[in-house]
Amino acid sequence: MPRCDSCEMLFVIFCCISVTVYNVIADESTSYCNKFTQDCHEMELPSESVTALAVVPYTEGQLLPHHRPTRDFHLGGQDIHIQQDWGSLGVAAVVWDAAIVLCEYLELHPEVVRQKQVVELGAGTGLVGIVASYLGGHVTVTERREAMPNLSKTVDTNRVDSCPGSITVKELDWTTDLSAHPQYDIILGADIIYIEDTFQALLTTLIHTAREDTSVLLSCRIRYDRDLNFLTLLEGHFHVEQIHYDKSRDIKIFSTKKIKTKT
Ligand SMILES: C[S@@+](CC[C@H](N)C(=O)[O-])C[C@H]1O[C@@H](n2cnc3c(N)ncnc32)[C@H](O)[C@@H]1O
């Protein structure tokens, strides 16, 4: 059968365009999955897929949330402005649904954080910590080193004079020495159960920063069976209870407390 070189060429061009368009229209869980591999290994590198987005015509309103340069929220009684940078900073510089759901939960239950010493782990843009401070918590938002400049910027942009709580930014990498970090009344984490390689370090961090009376609130979308492995690990040291489910966004919130050691 005669070969059709131009057909092959057209097919290759079609595939390239499809991959690029796929990157634009992928939903949160799919794009998360694409970024997942890159985040694990090349967190600081710009995303080539996002660079490629420049060739696709779009209007900002049609972009999926992660690809928008900014997000605006009204939470905790305040307007909040977040600049996103999925292209160069990846998962740490965009707002995940789990964060929004946890903020909405805290709005309904402000007593969880009011006048409490609160830490947010893997804070990303810091949305949850910012809202917790608006609700009266004394909050430390934490991240690994690469994400710190963006986190500090977002927190500073959203400082308000009338805030009944307070907010500070601190580096806390789950995989490093934790001895300088204190224990807190409340630990918050939104969408931090996602890299299996970090599960043990995250668990160690929770054990280190929690007292027996500390409440840990974790909001997450369970994307893969392996995510459940973390909950199994957690149950070795904490009582775990699902306290909320946002059906429309498929986000669960778990409340956990350390299992009391027998004296
Ligand atoms: C999916 S993002 C969630 C960000 C934010 N909590 C939200 O929901 O919008 C996961 C976050 O965990 C952080 N993270 C991953 N490994 C970490 C580690 N070893 N120490 C501290 N933070 C880490 C990432 O930098 C990232 O910001």
Image (cartoon, grey):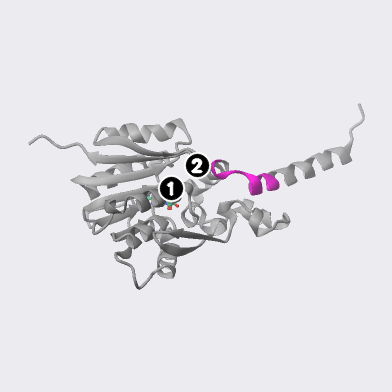
Disc 2 marks a residue whose amino acid type is Arg
Disc 1 marks a residue whose amino acid type is Val
Most foreground residue, 197 or 32? 32
The reply to whether residue 180 is in sight is yes
Residue 2, magenta (yes or no): no
Residue, x 24% and y 50% (percent of image)? 209
Q: Would you call the spot at circle 1 few (<14 residues within 10 Å), some (14-19), or many (20 or more)?
A: many
Residue 26, magenta (yes or no): yes
Q: Name the secondary structure under disc 2.
A: loop
Residue, x 22% and y 54% (percent of image)? 179
Q: What label does residue 249 carry, if any?
A: 2
Most foreground residue, 132 or 168? 132
In the rendered image, the vertical position of residue 29 relative to residue 49, given as above or below: above
Q: Name the secondary structure under disc 1.
A: helix
Residue, x 39% and y 32% (percent of image)? 228
Most foreground residue, 30 or 106? 106
Say whether disc 2 or disc 1 marks the residue closer to the N-terminus.
1
Q: Quadrant of residue 156?
A: bottom left
Measured in 3D between alpha carbons, the distance from the residue under mark 2 to the one under mark 1, in whole angstroms, is: 8 Å
Q: Is residue 27 left or right of residue 261?
A: right
Q: Is there a contact, CB below 8 Å, between mark 2 and mark 1? A: yes
Q: Quadrant of the N terminus?
A: top right
Q: Which residue is mark 1?
A: 101
Q: Tell me residue 58's x, y (percent).
A: 70, 56
Q: Would you call the spot at circle 2 few (<14 residues within 10 Å), some (14-19), or many (20 or more)?
A: few
Q: Quadrant of the C terminus?
A: top left
Secondary structure of the magenta portion, mostly? helix
Q: Tell me residue 121's x, y (percent).
A: 34, 52
Q: Which residues are magenta?
A: 20-29
Q: Tell me residue 98's x, y (percent).
A: 44, 46
The reply to whether residue 175 is in sight is no
Q: Tell me residue 110's x, y (percent).
A: 31, 54
